[in-house]
Image: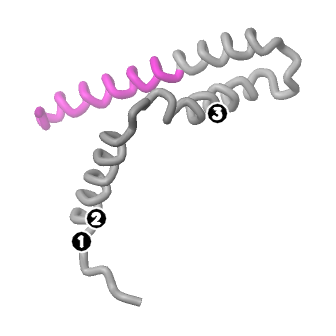
């Protein structure tokens, strides 16, 4: 087995390059990510309806609302971190 002398930074750069090439070769990005989006909505739906008692339409509607709430929370956290960083004098 051969040792890998590349640094973590070099490995990261190589991985980013590979990802960009992969996406450049993807003709339909939405179709490529659809299974992950569906799985995420299903996991969210299982939080409030683990026994699948709601209709599929209602589960999807509620899961999308929960996803939007999570994204709003992430946005709040990001804004708070930016304010904290700015107040500490570590601007861009």
Image coords of residue 33 (percent x, y): 50, 33
Horizontally, is 41 left or right of 88 in the view? right
Looking at the image, residue 33 sits to the left or right of residue 91; the answer is right
Q: Residues within 10 Å of mark 1 (few under 14, many from 20)?
A: few
Q: Mark 2: which secondary structure?
A: helix
Helix, strand or loop under label 1: loop
Q: Quadrant of residue 26?
A: top left
Q: Are marks 1 and 2 in contact (CB under 8 Å)?
A: yes
Residue 39 image label: 3
In the image, 65 versus 77, the foreground residue is 65
Left or right relative to 65: residue 89? left
Q: Position of residue 34 (x, y in %)?
A: 55, 30
Q: What residue sits right under mark 1 in the picture?
A: 7
Nearest-to-viewer mark from 1 and 3? 3
Residue designated by label 2:
11
Q: First in sequence: mark 2 or mark 3?
A: 2
Q: Position of residue 81 (x, y in %)?
A: 30, 31
Taken as a whole, is the magenta stretch helix, strand or loop? helix
- Extent of the magenta region: 70-92
Instruction: Report, in whole angstroms, how far the alpha carbon at label 1 lies from the one at label 3.
Output: 35 Å
Calculate the distance from the C-alpha at mark 1 to the C-alpha at mark 2. Answer: 6 Å
* Quarter of the image with the N terminus in it: bottom left
Q: Earlier in the sequence, mark 1 or mark 3?
A: 1
> Which residue occupies 69% across, 28% down?
42
**Which sits in the foreground, 60 or 87?**
60
Give SS at disc 3. helix
Task: Tell me how far mark 2 sits from mark 3, CA to CA.
Answer: 29 Å
């Amino acid at each position: 087995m051969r040792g890998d002398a590349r640094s973590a930074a070099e490995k990261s750069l190589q991985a980013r390059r590979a990802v960009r090439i992969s996406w450049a070769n993807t003709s339909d990005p939405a179709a490529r990510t659809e299974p992950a989006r569906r799985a995420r909505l299903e996991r969210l739906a299982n939080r409030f309806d683990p026994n699948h008692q709601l209709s599929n339409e209602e589960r999807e509607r509620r899961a999308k609302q929960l996803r939007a709430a999570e994204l709003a929370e992430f946005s709040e956290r990001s804004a708070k971190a930016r304010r904290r960083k700015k107040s500490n004098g570590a601007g861009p």
